[in-house]
Image (cartoon, helix red, strand yellow):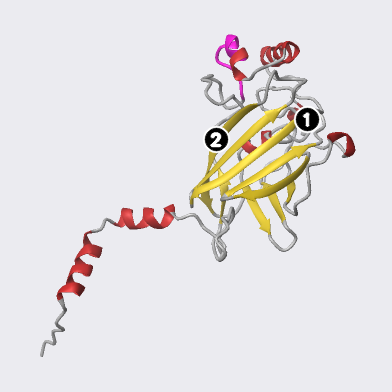
Amino acid sequence: MTVRKLLGPTTVALLFAAATLPASSQASDKAAATPRFPDGMVRFDRMPNEKGYWDNPTAVSLVEDGKKVEMDKNGKLKNLADAKNVAPFQPWALALYEYRQKNNFADDPMKVCIGPGNPRMMHWGGGLRILQDRNYKRAYMVFGTGNHGWRTIYMDGREPPNPEEVTLTFYGLSVGKMEGDALVAQSTGFNTRFWFSNGGLPHTEALRLTERITRPSHDVLHYEVTIDDPRTYTHPWKSSWDFHWVAGDVPTQFCEDGRK
């Protein structure tokens, strides 16, 4: 005996709509949602029981937003005449940048495994996680490359320090806060032992960075950095790019004779 269950017109309509909606649309709707904590704050890392990290940056080197400059993955300019378009250089800084381009980055500190510093790490690739420690009011950036380097962003309301009052480091001292859905960090106190771009962009101890990080969807992280170093550049300038979500764990990579 065949048993048939009668369905009302509303139920039939709902089932029909679900059946006709493409699976890709259903998946993309889920993927598009920006993960959040219960109080609404954006999560910049994994959801519980999820594995993943940020990688595949859409930029290979620092270039001022709005400028079109062709270069390879190592930051080597296709046309040296474009050097002046990369950033608003002071004359000495442009000359040094061009010199580093001409000698094929022979004196790049990364060739002897000296750390890449910030923001070079943010377009180096190799895996990135942003861990939000809301108990201690800090955020940690953990990198897969650079011998598993990591940096701390203090989110406890302190003011950015005077660079002359802190020990100069590769990542500087970072103080941050949430502005709506954006994590905004200001960093000062950089040493000059690193190139802050793989193309050979120079900087001085006067360098200040302002980073703005947003997560417009589950799979996209938008990164924007404003560079302010009046000794090296004629005015503050901005560069921005995206990262994409990759399932799994950050791969382990260590420097060996300058190789990733």
**Along the line of sight, the residue nearer the viewer: 111 or 117:** 117
Total labels drawn:
2
Within 10 angstroms of label 2, few (less than 14), some, or many (20 or more) residues?
Answer: some
Sooner in the amino-acid sequence: mark 1 or mark 2: 1
Q: Indicate the amino acid at tag 1.
A: Val
* SS of the residue under disc 1: helix
Q: Which mark is residue 211?
A: none
Residue 260 visible from this viewpoint: no
Q: Which mark is residue 112?
A: 1
Q: Indicate the amino acid at tag 2.
A: Trp
Q: Which residues are magenta?
A: 75-83
- Choose top left, top right, bottom left or bottom right for residue 256: top right
Q: Residue at x 60, y 19 (%)?
A: 86
Q: Quadrant of the C terminus?
A: top right
Within 10 angstroms of label 1, few (less than 14), some, or many (20 or more) residues?
Answer: few
**Along the line of sight, the residue nearer the viewer: 233 or 30:** 233
Residue found at the very far top of the displayed protein: 81
Q: Is residue 27 left or right of residue 113?
A: left
- Where residue 183 appears, as percent x and y from the top left, is 63, 47
Measure how far apart labels 1 and 2 are at the Cα level. 28 Å
**Along the line of sight, the residue nearer the viewer: 39 or 248:** 39
- Where residue 87 appears, as percent x and y from the top left, is 63, 20
* SS of the residue under disc 2: strand
Residue highlighted by disc 2: 241
Q: Is residue 203 left or right of residue 57?
A: right
Residue 86 visible from this viewpoint: yes
- Where residue 43 appears, as percent x and y from the top left, is 57, 56
